Every structure is written in C-alpha cells, then in structure tokens.
Image (cartoon, rainbow, N blue to C red):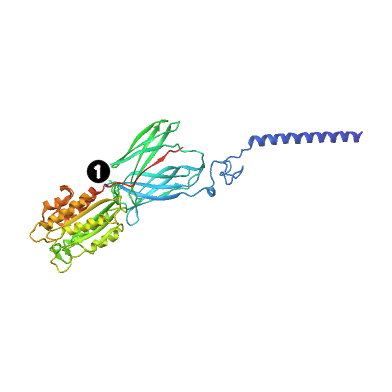
Amino acid sequence: MYNELTWAKKRQIIIVVGLSFIFLLIVSVTLYNLLKKPATCFDNKRNQNETGIDCGGVCSAICKADSKSLVIDWVRLFKIREGEYSVIAQIDNPAANSVARDVPYTFSLRNKSGETVTTRSGKTFIPARKTFVVFEGTIETSASPDSVFFQFDQEPNWQKSSYIEPNLVISNKELINIDSLPRMNATVQNPNIIDVNNVTLSALIYDDDENVVQVSQTYIENIKAGQSANIAFTWPQPISLKSRICESPVDTALVIDRSGSMEYLGKNPQQPLTDVKNAAESFVGELSKYDQASVVSFANTASEPVDISLSKDLSKVKSTIDSISILTPVLQNTNIGDGLQKGLNELISQNAKSNSGKILVLLTDGVANLPFKKGNSKYPESYALAVAKNAKDQGIRIFTIGLGKDLHQDFLKQVASTPTDFYLAPTAKELTAIYREIGTKMCKRKPTALEIVISIPN
C-alpha cells in the first residue's frame, strides 16, 4: 500500500513538473516574442545580411568601405562688383547608385597671404554618377579675397538610390552684351511624360583656355511635361575674358616703322619706339591660341627676311617685337610701301591658313619718302596706295596708326580699309588703347563654351 501511494505520488509530481515546464516554456516564448526587437538598419548592430553596422545588404545606407571618393575638379572665385563675390566648385561623384542629401560644406575666401577673410556654408544634394556644381553667390566682404578653398564639413551619409534624374534638354544658348551688362539666354525643354520640379540651373562661361571666367545660377520651380521654359542668367558688370577668340582664326601682319625719327624723344631707350613695341606686344598678348602673327619692321626698306614669319608661337612673336631697333646709320627713311608689300606677302604665303581672317596693322610716325622715282615726288605714297589696294582686293583688312604730328593723315586714311580704320595717336601713350580697339574690331570677343549644369534632387 505504501509503495503504491508512493508511486502515485511520484507520477503526480512528474506530471506537475512536466506541465509546469511546458507552461514556463510557453510563457517564455510568448514573452520573448513580445519583447524581442526585430533586426533593423538602425539598431547599431551588424545583423541581417549587413556588410557593416547598419549598412550594406538590405540596408539603404552604403558602408564607407564600399563608397567611392568624391573628386573636387576645381574651385573658382569671381568678383561680381566691388565688395561682392560668388564662388563655385565642380565635383564628380563616380558612384553609380550612391546619393547623399543635405551634405554640409564651406567655402573659405582667402587673401593673398592665405588668411581666411570670410566663409560661406550651406548644404547640398550629391547625385549618383554625375558631375555637379556647388554655387554660392552674393558673398559680401570688405576684404579683397584672392582665392577660395572648398570642403565638405562631414562625411556624406551615402544612400542607395535607383533614382534617375529626369532628362531636360537645353537649347538656344546665347550670350549677349558681354562688354556691358552680360545676359545669357537659353531654353529648357521637358520631354518627359511627367512634370519636373525644383530644377536648379548653373551657367558656366569658358574662355578658349578652358577656364571658367564667370558663373551664375537660376531656379525653376516646375516645368510641365512636354513643355519648355525660357531662362536667363545676368551679370552686373562686363565679363572679362582672359583671351580673345575670333569667330574664325586670324592671321595678322604687324608692320612697324623703325625709321630714324622713332628715337627723336630719346636714345636710351629709343623713344617713342620702345612704347610702340610695348603696345604691339600687348596686342599680340590678346590674340588666341588659334591665331597667327608676323612682324615686319621697315625704314629705308622692310626687313628681309621679315622679322618673323606668320607663327602661332605668340611668345616668340612678342620677343621678336622687343628686339626691333633703329639701325645705323640713324639716317633711316620711311618706305611704307615696302613694309606693306612684305606684310601682304606674309598674309598670302604658304604660312597663312586658308580659313583664317587676314589683318594688316601699319604703324608709322612719318611721311612716306621711299621708294624714290625721279620726277615723281608723290611716288612713295602712290606706290604704297597701290600695294594697299592689291591687299584689300585679296580680302585683307588694313588698319593704320599715325603716331605724332608729322603725318599725311589723308594718305593713311586711304591706305586703311575704311577711314574709320585709321587711328591718330598724338603720343605713344594712346597706342595700347588703340591696339585694343583694333583687336575688338578685327575679332569679336566671345567665349568658346557656354555650359548649363542641371541639378534635380530627388
């Protein structure tokens, strides 16, 4: 009896213990499921199939080890007006599917000593696999900044993105009034079947050395599907191009008087010849890399061979001008006709480019008195006029510059292609401005490229 009761008691205990265990297991599982936090991309743990803590795998964030570095192509500083500047940085994101939003940045404007005089900060969207720009305008400072430094203030928070920026088409780009109040007009078209919102457009103007010489920005809130909008960028002051490029390249012959009278103001240095040479070198410095120039100096006769044949090596042309001097004996006459002829020969020689414009610029401070023809005192001028006519008949435009007072102005006006292509310089001080005006006449200044960069953050 005792043993049976003991067995029954044991069985009861076993059953109770088993049921208790099952109950505790159920309760534990239930509580675990209720209290357990699911793995996320924000739990500061490397779980799921993440390749880093809360990045990679199923997470939208891209791990730093998997991201590609941004490349800052260039940074530029532009003066808008006195005390007011704009800045721009061009940056390349090589990553195909990585974007970053609200990335903080800072532009630091520095003086010639490298000291920061003012800063401008902001935030930007970084698109995937695209070159983009960061622009800040109307930065006011009483200092005179000489350069600018750009940096991102923190590592971008890279996110995966399949976003494809809507395609917008830019057409009808035109830059007008470059020497007064520049304005760039263009048309932006939305060929997509959906509206496009929040469009930022940055205009970049390049010179022929591929330098950005000015920039501006505008914003379009909405462009309807299938429609277009006219846009404009403006600047309050003329745009200064480092170099000038023509509608077509130009071949130029500089014909320079080196007769004895070109040192009547001084012999060491020879004046006004020295000022003449400086002005001519300044003119050559304004030519573009697509142009050519030659130099012909003359006195009793023109130089033979010419001082330098047509060349695109403009540095060599300038050094040739600098080497011109008055030959001995000082009694050197003025053979304008021979100077014109040698200049003409250069412009129709094999050195000339068939697709280039042809310009001849004559500078003299005296009266033509050679070549001599017995019984005809007017022959030096009539010979020069005949050469000039021959040149003009071949499409060469002639500019003439008369220096000083001892001139036959009517003769020089006839040598020139038109009377307005004759310039009178009472002193050598006016020559640089005259050469600059000739450069403007002979070749319209224009940039080589107008670029509009589009940004449409998603």
Q: Is residue 88 visible?
A: yes
Q: Position of residue 448 (x, y in %)?
A: 33, 47
Residue 376: quarter of image: bottom left
Question: Residue 147 versus residue 238: which sits nearer the camera?
Answer: 238
Camera-nearest residue between 431 and 86: 431
- Residue 267: x percent and y percent? 15, 66
Judged from this view, the residue extending furthest toward the bottom is 329
Locate the N terminus and report the quarter of the image it occupies: top right
- State the image coordinates of residue 223 (x, y, percent, origin top left): 40, 32
Q: Residue drawn 85% across and 34% down?
A: 9
Using a 10 Å C-alpha cutoff, classify the residue at mark 1 as few (fewer than 14 neighbours), some (14 to 19) or many (20 or more): few
- Which residue is located at x 41 percent, y 31 percent? 226
Left or right, residue 22 beside residue 317:
right
Residue at the extreme right of the image, as rendered: 1
Q: Amino acid at mark 1?
A: Ser
Residue 320 vs 418, above or below: the answer is: below
Residue placed under numbered mark 1 in the picture:
180
| Residue 437 visible | no
Count the marks: how many?
1
Element marked by disc 1 = loop
Give x and y (percent) for residue 105.
Answer: 42, 46
